[in-house]
Amino acid sequence: MEQQRDQWATKIGLILAMAGNAVGLGNFVRFPTQVAQNGGGAFMVPYFIALFFLGIPIMWVEWVAGRYGGKYGHGTLGPSYYLMARESVKPRGALWWGVLAGMLGFALTVLLNSYYLHLIGWSAAYTYFSAAGSYFGQNTGTFFDNYLSNHAEVFLFWGITVVLLAIAVGQGVSKGIERWVKVMMPLLYIFAIILVGYVFVIGSPINPNWSTIDGFKFIWSPNWSYLSSHFAAVMLAATGQIFFTLSLGMGIIQNYASYLGPNDDVALSGIATVSLNEFAEVVLGGSLAIPIATAYASRIVPANVFSQGKDAALSWIGQHFGLGFSYTSLPNAFIQMGSVGRLFGALWFLLLWFAGFTSAIAMYNYLVALLEEDLNIKRSIGTWIVLLIYFIMGLPVIYISTYMNQLDSWISFQLTLLALVDIIVAVYLFKPSNFWDELHKGAWIHVPTWYKWVTVIIAPILLLIPLVGNFKSFVTGKIGIAPWTAIIVMFIIGAIESYYAIKKKYAEELEKNEVIVRL
């Protein structure tokens, strides 16, 4: 039976929410880091290949799956993918596809936010530290290490972030999430544009031979020799970045799309989401961190390396470019700017906080929807249960130094794995013709037919590249005992929850175990 649920109040609210879901720390921190560490311009070629042949088609797949599940009252993957899988297999077989998808979606959302929320908390802290000039005149690496060791301070800024998330999500979709993103997303773009404008103004502030233009050249000059010798590694990094930046393979696109009406457009909305995200990432994100770092390279790069020339200095920046909080990152550049550095440092980290917040709000809502729809727990109560879950799962991030990086390597793998499940269930088992019809139901544009075959044939093949590449590293012991324990526990809980949610609502047809024929 089709069911009525909370829906987006306006089209612009939906687009901004979806864009906010996609635009996050991955756009302004992870993207320049991946570019810097993968040969600059060598990274951009496989990046755009992954965007057009993986990112866009999978974005449409997840919008279709979300709207379809929402029509029957589901905003989580387990029940939604059960409904889609039963188009081709018997209900008992579809049950296990739903359990697999639900398990992956639950585990990924909890595990990713266990450390992602801390990164957002760091951004909130550094907004304050920049405005106050706390790290000015100090070694930024030592300052950052001291901050991480001050657990009370870390929990303070984490707590401010998560409590605000709980308040926003607890107010619902149209009255909570939509209202928050309508304020935060325009401000995010305004702050980013102001910072980009400053990048073009500063020119060569320290050394006349080094300017922000060198950063743009590093990003946009194709490095074919590097690409030819490192193609597999760069393609792997580019594919992972596309999934991370578009929030694919997480279940949260489907969750937001589930609040659409059954005939609301998903074709144009999906491409609009991609476009807003890519503008934020490639145009804005690509114009900030690396160009600023190169403009101040003479003060950031060690003298013995800097004296070897630009190639050596750019290579050093690429190898040492990190999360944006310490060592060779932007705080050093802000210090060199003098008093104006406090203002632009605060704007930069506030931009990161807004970007992270608008992404985290979508993941937060996924878990609240799971508690509300699958377990009948009131939204007002579920928001605080999720906060408690995040607090417990985030403890290892603070107390185990290697935990976050090891868990992040698994997350990159799981994003791709769940994206493959998206295509298997929402395209193959749902049937490609049904998927194509659903994509164009109420559509404001017609998607070229060749994209159907990209989705059915090319995208699954390309997905195998990061899956195989990452799996090999896991076999050789890349992940420690603590992350594996968290992963396995979340898998078990997610599988049990999805199994219960599907059995609770579809027990009768599971008993009949007959193939559902779509009329």
Image: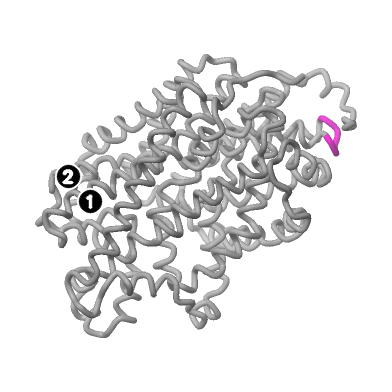
The answer to whether mark 1 and mark 2 are in CB contact below 8 A is yes
Q: Judge left or right: residue 441 versus residue 390.
A: right
User: Is residue 107 shown above or below 415?
Assistant: above
Q: Judge left or right: residue 289 versus residue 277.
A: left
Q: How is the image coloured?
A: one colour
Magenta stretch holds residue 180:
no
**Amino acid type, residue under disc 2 in the picture:** Ala
Q: How many marks?
A: 2
| Residue 350 visible in the displayed image | yes
Q: Residue at x 60, y 52 (%)?
A: 416
Mark positioned earlier in the residue sequence (1 or 2): 2
Q: Is disc 1 placed on a helix, strand or loop? A: helix
Q: Residue at x 62, y 36 (%)?
A: 254
Q: Is disc 2 placed on a helix, strand or loop? A: helix
Majority secondary structure of magenta residues = loop
Residue furthest out toward the left = 137
User: Is residue 259 shown above or below 438?
Assistant: above
Rendered image: mark on residue 345: 1
Quarter residue 371 falls in:
top right
Q: Position of residue 362 (x, y in %)?
A: 49, 35
Q: Position of residue 469 (x, y in %)?
A: 59, 63
Crowd rating for badge 1 (residues with CA inside 10 Å; few <14, some 14–19, many 20+): many
Q: Residue at x 54, y 55 (%)?
A: 242
